[in-house]
């Protein structure tokens, strides 16, 4: 198995249901390192050297986060701005990420039937992830199909199509398999 880095960016992990279930399903995997950005950087002062060293070491990188305003949580955006620098991630000598694999792992409040053309949010998750896909491309990384869990809005809102505990557990097991496949196929 190849080693794999999960960069977890959840602004309120203590209250999480979806990302917590995903983490619980993968944290025992010996080849997985979970790097929790909000825990590591409570004051948002990102140690660029450490982050770049981590990215140099791992060839398989998962960005795991809850979708927020159809985008990444703000500390993950800051991480991208601070860490994916010219001369490291791009530019003539910025080849540190070349050939590495990037896979998003996303949770959304909205249900899967909202994430279609003409649905409640008009666009697919692939369309919302284009900036991540192109960031991977710009850094000469291989972008993998995202792993997505939909329907995590609180039950109290009464919105149909939300994920049950059984479905979430099944999704978390699929996530575990997906990471196992990724680590095995890239070995
Ligand atoms: C600031 C904020 C913005 C959000 N924006 C979206 C959004 O654009 N689309 C969506 O489907 N859910 C959105 N949500 C809901 C979260 O994606 C959802 O609560 C999260 O994925 C659930 O995962 P968790 O149980 O790990 O917290 C948003 C939540 C917050 C707090």
Image (tube, rainbow, N blue to C red):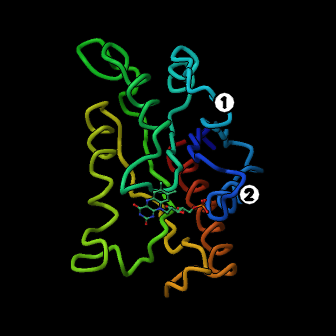
Please say if 2 is above or below 151: above
Judged from this view, the residue extending furthest toward the front is 157
Q: Is residue 168 left or right of residue 97?
A: right
Within 8 Å of ligand 1, the CB of disc 2?
no
Closer to us: mark 1 or mark 2? 1
Please say if 9 is above or below 57: below
Q: Looking at the picture, how far across and down is residue 125, in whole percent?
A: 34, 64
Q: Is residue 161 left or right of residue 171?
A: left
CA separation, marks 1 and 2? 19 Å
Are the two marked residues, 1 and 2, in contact with CB atoms closer than 8 angstroms? Answer: no
Q: Looking at the picture, how far across and down is residue 104, in whole percent?
A: 45, 51
Please say if 100 is above or below 120: above
Residue depicted at 51% across the width and 45% down the height: 62
Q: Quadrant of residue 173?
A: bottom right
Q: Secondary structure at mark 2?
A: helix
Q: Quadrant of residue 47?
A: top right
Packing grade of label 2 (10 A; few <14, some 14-19, many >=20) is some
**Mark on residue 159?**
none
Q: Quadrant of residue 36?
A: top right
Residue depicted at 36% across the width and 57% down the height: 70
Judged from this view, the residue extending furthest toward the right is 28
Residue on which disc 2 sits: 24
Q: Looking at the picture, how far across and down is residue 65, in whole percent?
A: 52, 51
Q: Quadrant of the N terminus?
A: top right
**Most foreground residue, 77 or 139:** 77
Q: Secondary structure at mark 1?
A: helix
Q: Earlier in the sequence, mark 1 or mark 2?
A: 2
Within 8 Å of ligand 1, the CB of disc 1?
no
Q: Looking at the picture, how far across and down is residue 29, in whole percent?
A: 73, 49
Residue depicted at 22% across the width and 80% down the height: 118
Packing grade of label 1 (10 A; few <14, some 14-19, many >=20) is few
Residue on which disc 1 sits: 40
């Amino acid at each position: 198995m190849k080693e794999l880095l999960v960069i977890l960016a959840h602004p309120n992990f203590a209250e999480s249901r979806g990302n917590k279930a995903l983490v619980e399903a993968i944290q025992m995997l010996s080849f997985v390192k979970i790097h929790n950005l909000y825990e590591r950087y409570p004051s948002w002062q990102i140690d660029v050297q450490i982050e770049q060293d981590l990215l140099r070491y791992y060839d398989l990188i998962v960005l795991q986060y809850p979708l927020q305003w159809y985008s990444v949580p703000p500390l993950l955006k800051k991480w991208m701005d601070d860490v994916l620098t010219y001369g490291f991630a791009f530019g003539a000598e910025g080849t540190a990420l070349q050939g590495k694999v990037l896979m998003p792992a996303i949770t959304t409040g909205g249900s899967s039937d909202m994430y279609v053309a003409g649905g409640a949010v008009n666009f697919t998750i692939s369309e919302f992830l284009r900036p991540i896909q192109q960031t991977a491309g710009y850094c000469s990384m291989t972008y993998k199909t995202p792993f997505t869990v939909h329907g995590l809005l609180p039950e109290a809102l009464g919105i149909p199509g939300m994920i049950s505990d059984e479905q979430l557990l099944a999704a978390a097991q699929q996530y575990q398999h997906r990471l196992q496949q990724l680590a095995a196929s890239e070995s």
